[in-house]
Amino acid sequence: DIQLTQSPSFLSASVGDRVTITCRASQGISSYLAWYQQKPGKAPKLLIYAASTLQSGVPSRFSGSGSGTEFTLTISSLQPEDFATYYCQQLNSYPPSTFGQGTRLEIK
Amino acid sequence: QVQLQESGPGLVKPSQTLSLTCTVSGGSISSGGYYWSWIRQHPGKGLEWIGYIYYSGSTYYNPSLKSRVTISVDTSKNQFSLKLSSVTAADTAVYYCARGGSSGYSKYYFDYWGQGTLVTVSS
């Protein structure tokens, strides 16, 4: 099975900061990767799919990049509502969909 | 606006069958074009995809759960359901239903989710 490893697992940052979260796949997955945001007690929200395509309605301060085994999610200028846990998800391999362990983003 | 709502018992005894239903509003399952999934999240942990169904009844399950999972659809009620048999404490989790895309890899891009329901397995 393909393993996804997110780093860091925990990130402390301030409003206005630029932050980057990395997701590494144990094998190449082309661009079949998505990113989700989850706030406490809520369902995940799709932010980015196909590694770099912004989901409709998601602010443009979110961006994704990468292909193969290394991917990044960048938030260009953190807003108070962005503090949450972020998950990457791969769709390329057996089993067909697995998620990373999450990156918790907290206010410094 | 598509909305999904999970329903079912919040407590299930070990060795019994967990049964949940997802009711879809704001869109018709039978119109096709989307795959409907169940996903779970163990307390304080990450996400695990369980399986999906298409309006035709075609299903695909996570191999790690396949022997215990059944997903079905009732287009007349605009609902789809999950049954997970022989549950143990390890099946305690928040269970979500979600909508995936129409084909290929997009089946696994989940753009609408229910709010989730906690199911505890305990005697």
Image (tube, rainbow, N blue to C red):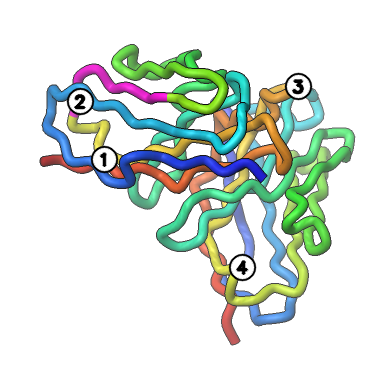
In this figure, which residue is indicated by the disc labeled 4? Answer: B91
Please tell me whether residue A94 is drawn above or below residue B88 in the rendered image.
Answer: above
In front of the other: B63 or B121: B63
Identify which residue, B117 or B102, lies in the foreground: B102
Inspect the magenta stretch and tell me whether residue A76 lies in it: yes
The Cα atoms of the two marked residues, 2 and 1, are separated by 10 Å
Residue B4 versus residue B33 in the image, above or below: below
Q: Which class describes the residues within 10 Å of circle 4: few (<14), some (14-19), or many (20+)?
A: some
Disc 1 with disc 3 on a shared chain: no
Q: Which residues are magenta?
A: A72-79
Q: Residues within 10 Å of mark 3 (few under 14, many from 20)?
A: few
SS category of the residue bearing label 3: loop
Question: Which residue is labeled 3 in the image?
Answer: B103
Residue labelled with disc 1:
A105
Q: Is residue A55 visible?
A: no
Q: Is the same chain shared between marks 4 and 1?
A: no
Check contact, mark 2 vs mark 4: CB within 8 A.
no
Please state if B111 lies on the left or on the right of B74 as rendered. Answer: left
Dot 2 and dot 1 residues touching (CB under 8 Å): yes
